[in-house]
Image: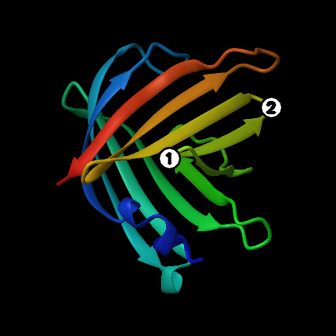
Amino acid sequence: MTTARGLPFLVGRYDGAETMHASAWAPAGTATSTISGEVELDGSIIVQRYTQYRDGAESFASLGVWMTDPATGEYLYYAYDSAGFPADPPARGTWREGELVLDRDTPRGSSRLVICRVGDGWSWSKTYRVPGASEWQPVQDALFSPA
């Protein structure tokens, strides 16, 4: 399966309405965003450009690369962002009960990204837990609608 065929809703241009939960990276509040995805390398990857705005100014940006692991069939998500941490290892995941759930573990902690199709758009929810903790803390929820 090519990544583009498995995740077609990630391709195109979307506007986002976001809820930011208080975290180590940002205070609680709301944000808006734009995200655009393009198919590359004959459908084997999707490249997304994401920009978040808070109080009318750019507050965060990322470049995401989606692909399928040919050995396991899992989806891989490499996120390069303006915070500057490396995208290694990628988040890995599969579909679970209608949600694409991707997990990533680093020495700084674990992150989880949950993506769902919503009407003609899609949503994501990001959570985080510090090393050694058992509970996930909400970071961000966003709903993306076609631009």
- Identify residue type, mark 1: Gly
In the rendered picture of this protein, how many numbered marks are placed on residues? 2
Residue 116: image location, x then y, percent: 43, 45
Assign a secondary structure to mark 1.
loop
> Residue 118, labelled with which disc?
none
Whether residue 101 sits left or right of residue 18 in the image: it is right
Assign a secondary structure to mark 2.
loop
Q: Mark 2 points at which residue?
A: 107
Rendered residue at 21%/24% (across/down): 55
The quadrant in which residue 21 appears is top left
Rendered residue at 64%/67% (across/down): 68
Name the foreground residue: 25 vs 73. Answer: 73
Q: Mark 1 points at which residue?
A: 98
Contact (Cβ within 8 Å) of mark 2 with mark 1: no
Image colouring: rainbow
Name the foreground residue: 135 vs 90. Answer: 135
